[in-house]
Amino acid sequence: MVHKIVYSNVFLFVVLMAISCNNKEVEKLKTLTFSIAEEIPVPEPSGIDLTYNEEGFWIVSDQNSKVYLIDGWGREIKSFKVSGEDLEGITVINDSTLAVVLERSREVVIFDTSGKELNRTSLDLEGELNSGLEGITYDPKVKRFYIVNEKKPRLLITLDENLIELKRDTIDFSQDVSGIFFDDNDNTLWILSDESQRIYKTDLSGNPIEEFKIKITQPEGITFNKTRTKLYIVSDKTENLYVFDLE
């Protein structure tokens, strides 16, 4: 009987310690709250990046396969169509060149800011058509693209400047992945999850460093300004641009 009591107490102590640790983890998980929710003239926006001079935004629509340029007030400046369907991410390469990903065809397309296509490649990926490529970002210093595949499997794929695949890493910290941003301040990635309603800061192999909760329905695109004082997210569902003040 004494042994049973001792074992029972030890088990209870272990359970209480586990609960305490979990509570501490929950307490450490920060919630980011947006300061502005602005309607934008883009149907089902699914990717975003600031323009090279940070005076506006490049945004893609997965409804009509168009790329939109909007100003800081949310007004459309111009738009053009990309050949293919289901645009899901966009990144600025330099002041005259952009890149997007197409989910269903698993393609990466590079074009200039007038809409002229410069390069295109397909990635060797299986899975459901609607669970493919979801986001793209670019490191201009080493000329690397980082691309995320939504799920089944969830992947972080690294390409060189010629769109040649260098490696792929499995992502196992979220239910899905829906956007990505490269942070040249510390060579990290910010990965967005629609289903988990989370933002994860990771290393360049997708290993998580920090995690943040957000309260946005169907977030599908993420970017920061150069000073990292503002975070921007677009929602496919609400068709809003959300602004977070990080100062």
Image (cartoon, rainbow, N blue to C red):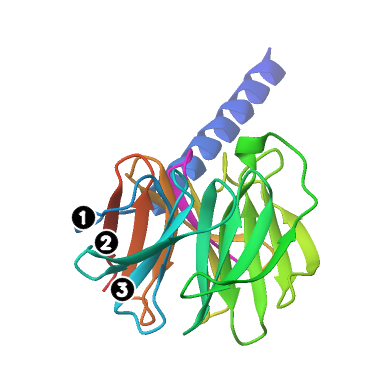
Residue position for label 3? 56
Kindly report which numbered mark, 2 or 3, lies closer to the viewer in this rendering: 3
The image quarter containing residue 205 is bottom right
Is residue 136 or residue 11 the one in the foreground? 136
Residue type marked 1: Glu
Which residue is painted at 55% across and 72% down in the image? 116
Residue 244's label in the rendered image is: none
Where residue 47 sits in the image (x, y, percent)? 45, 57
Write the residue at 68% across / 47% down: 105
Q: Nearer the viewer, mark 3 or mark 1?
A: 3
Q: What distance separates the C-alpha of mark 2 from that of mark 1?
A: 8 Å
Between the residue at mark 3 and the residue at mark 1, the CA separation in whole angstroms equals 14 Å
Q: Where does the image place residue 39, in percent across and percent down from the top left?
A: 22, 52
Q: Which mark is residue 243?
A: 2
| Nearer mark to the viewer, of 2 and 1 | 1
Among the 4 quarters of the image, the one containing residue 222 = bottom left
Magenta-highlighted residues: 194-202
- Disc 2 to disc 3, C-alpha distance: 13 Å
Q: The residue tagged with tag 3: helix, strand or loop?
A: strand
Give, as a three-letter code, the residue at label 3: Gly
Q: Is residue 174 above or below residue 208?
A: above
Whether tag 2 and tag 1 are in contact, CB under 8 A, the answer is yes
* Residue 180 in sight in this render: no
Q: Residues within 10 Å of mark 1 (few under 14, many from 20)?
A: some
